[in-house]
Image (cartoon, rainbow, N blue to C red):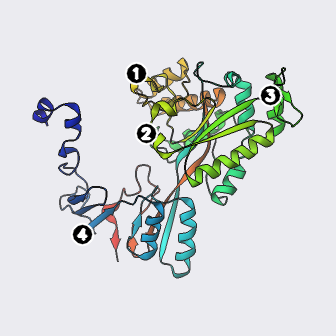
Amino acid sequence: MQQAFDQSDADAFISHPYWAAEYVGLGPFRLSRWEPGAYIEGSAFEGHVLGRPRIDRVVVRFFQDENAALTSLLAGDSQYASGRSLRFEHSVSLRREWDSGKRGIVLLAPDTSRFVSVQFRPDVVAPRQLLDLRVRQAIVHAVNRDALNAGLFDGEAEMSDMFMTLYSRYERVQNMPRALAEGDGAITHYAYDERKTAQLMTRAGFARGRDRTFVNAMGDRFSLDVWTHASPQYEKELAILIDSWSQAGFDLHPTVLPAAALRDGQLRASFPGLYIASSSRLSSFTTSNISGPANRWSGNNRGGWSNPEYDRLAVSFNSTLDPDARISQVVQMLKLLSDELPSWVLYYNPSVAAHAAALRGPDNGSLNTDVWNVYEWELQ
C-alpha cells in the first residue's frame, strides 16, 4: 500500500479497493463475490488455522429493513440472522412460529447498554440545576426499570445499573465474574423511589407546585428536555421513561431525532438536558473523548463531563498488565460514574440471533462476535 499512500490523497487512499474487495485476511471464508449493498459470497478457506470450515459456501445478505430479515428467516430463504439484525419483538414472533414445529432456535444475550447522559457544558446545559448532583440523583431515583423491562421485553431483559456486563467487549479483565461482583458491591445503587426523588429535589431548592410538578422558589417549573433517536423500541422506551418521570414530578419535553442525526456528532452533543443513547464504554467518559471541534465531534463523551481522577484511572487501566490492579481500576471507574452520575445505565439491549433448525453450531454467548465459531457450523 506504500505506493498508493504516496500517490493518493486521503480520500482516495481510504477508498482504495484493498480495504474492500481486494483485502486478504485469515478468516475461515475467502471472498468470492461482493455486490455492494446486496450480498457478500464466501467460499471455504482450505488453509484456515483452526481447520477448513464444514460449510463450503456462505452468502451474507444485507437487509435495509429488519422486518425483511425476519420474513427471509420465516420463509426459509435465510438460515441465520446475526445479532442486531432483529429486534426483541421479532424474537417473540419467531418463537411463536418455530417452537411448535421445532423449526429454529432464537438466541438472546445482553449486548449494548441503553443509557442516559447529562449535559455538562455550561453554555449548553438547561436547566443549570442539572449540574447539582442532588438533582441528578433525584432523576435516577425516578427511573422505573421494572416498567421498562415489562413494557419492552416482557420481563426478559437484563436490567442493569452498571456500565459493564459479563459480555462487555472492551473493558476486558482476566476474571470478569470477580470484577462484576466487586463492581456491584462498590457502586452506588439508586432504587426506584419517588420519596427519595422528592427529598433530593427539596434539598436542591424545589417544591411541589399545584399540579405536583417541581418548581423553584420563584414558582418556575423544573423543565427538562429529553432526546432520543427514532425507533419503535426507543420511542416506546421514551414514553415509559416520560411516564415515570412525570409521575415523580418532572416536567419533560421529549425530542425524537431522525436516523440521519446519528451521523451528526455536533448535533448529538448539543442536547440541553438528557440524551438517551446506546453502547457506551468506560473509555467514553474520559476528557479526551469529549465530543468537540478538535475531534470533529466524533468523541463519545457528548455531555462534556470531565473528572481528573477518572482520566487517571483510565490511563492506568490501559497501561497495566497486573490482573488484580486492572480489576481495581475498573471498579473505581464504575464507582466514580455511579457517584457523579454523568450517565446511568437503563438496561442492556438483548442481542437477538436466530437460526434454522437445520443449522448447527451458532452461539451468540461469545465475548467477541456471534459468528466466532462459524468454521464449526454445519448445515444438515
Taking 341 as reference, is 264 left or right? Answer: left
* Nearest to N terminus: mark 3 or mark 1: 3
Taking 38 as reference, is 2 left or right? Answer: left
Q: Are marks 4 and 1 in contact (CB under 8 Å)?
A: no
Q: Which residue is mark 1?
A: 294
Q: Nearer the viewer, mark 2 or mark 3?
A: 2
Q: Nearer the viewer, residue 63 or 113?
A: 63
Is 94 located above or below residue 12 in the figure? below
Q: Residue at x 72, y 34 (%)?
A: 139
Q: Nearer the viewer, residue 54 or 243?
A: 243
Under mark 4, the amino acid is Asp
Give residue 344's position: percent from left, percent from top. Answer: 62, 36
Please tell me the numbered disc located at residue 263.
Answer: 2
Q: Which residue is mark 3?
A: 201
Give residue 125's position: percent from left, percent from top. Answer: 62, 24
Under mark 3, the amino acid is Met
Say which quarter of the image contains residue 273. top right
Rounded to the nearest angstrom, the CA distance separating label 4 from label 3 is 63 Å
- Quick one: SS at disc 1? helix
